[in-house]
Image (spheres, coloured by chain):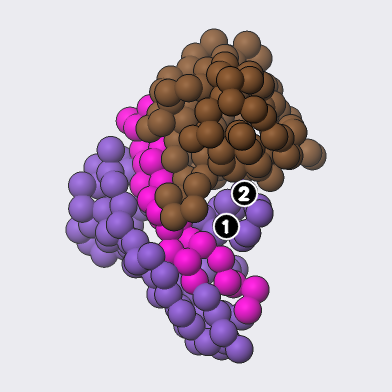
Amino acid sequence: NAGVTQTPKFQVLKTGQSMTLQCAQDMNHEYMSWYRQDPGMGLRLIHYSVGAGITDQGEVPNGYNVSRSTTEDFPLRLLSAAPSQTSVYFCASSYTTSGTGELFFGEGSRLTVL
Amino acid sequence: LAKTTQPISMDSYEGQEVNITCSHNNIATNDYITWYQQFPSQGPRFIIQGYKTKVTNEVASLFIPADRKSSTLSLPRVSLSDTAVYYCLVGDVYGGSQGNLIFGKGTKLSVKP
């Protein structure tokens, strides 16, 4: 099984550009989420979804959009990138709808905004 | 939502037992406690989960006192490969947290030879 797959692994953007970070899981998990990780800040929750068609905001949702049209995919969109969004982004999924079963993480996507 | 507090860093030597404590004073009745390990340039991975008393698996033990306001991850006989950041996460497996899972800042464990 592939588990949780994130693409791209690395991306450089200019301020104001848009892009989408892709996340796909093949475990039929209902719960999916996005975190960002910055030095000394741990993991901060951006958005999460407890099932197809359902999304909600986490701690730091500003500047990011998500949608969940299928169980497998949970893309994260940056509509107008800012240098403050330079970070490592992790997607996670879980078999329980609250996400408090075992969370499976992707390998991360490192984004640099110039 | 239960917030967690952990030491920022800990040092140990190979072969020692390491105990990392997490405080979660406002833990709710339905909350479980889960620990994750993260190596540099990788996503976190599940170590152990528990509700009360003691849980043990092949890599760690988790001790939870009766009041559940703290928990301790115990790593027996650590090796250099245990150098990582360890996160404590508290949440409701019955959906009470509604998926809003907040990690703390983690504890950076450094194991020296």
Chain A on-screen colour: brown
Residue found at x 58% / y 51%: B44
Horizontal and vertical percent for residue A58? 40, 29
In the image, what residue type sits under mark 2? Gly
Q: Residue drawn at (53%, 87%), measured in percent from left and top? A: B13
Image coords of residue A12 (percent x, y): 69, 34
Q: Which residues are magenta?
A: B80-109
Query: Which residue bears the numbered disc 1?
Result: B38
Q: Is residue A105 left or right of residue B11?
A: right
Quarter residue B72 falls in: bottom left
A30 in relation to B27, above or below? above
Q: Which mark is residue B60?
A: none
Q: Chain of mark 1?
A: B
Which residue is at the front of the view, A63 or A46?
Answer: A63
Residue B55: x and y in percent read 44, 63
The amino acid at mark 1 is: Gln
| Image side of residue B88 versus residue A14, left or right | left
Residue A78 appears left or right of A23: left
Mark 2 — on which chain does it sit? B
The residue furthest right is A1
Which quadrant is home to the N terminus of chain A?
Answer: top right
Residue at the (52%, 39%) spot, across then down: A36
Using the image as rendered, state which of residue B85 and residue A69 is in the foreground. B85
- Res. A34 image quadrant: top right
The residue that label 2 is drawn on is B43
* Position in image of residue A29 (x %, y %): 61, 29
Check the image and report above or below for B104 versus B93.
below
* Mark 2 neighbour density, 10 Å: few (under 14) some (14–19) many (20 or more): many
Task: Please tell me the colour of chain B.
Answer: purple
Callout 2 secondary element: loop
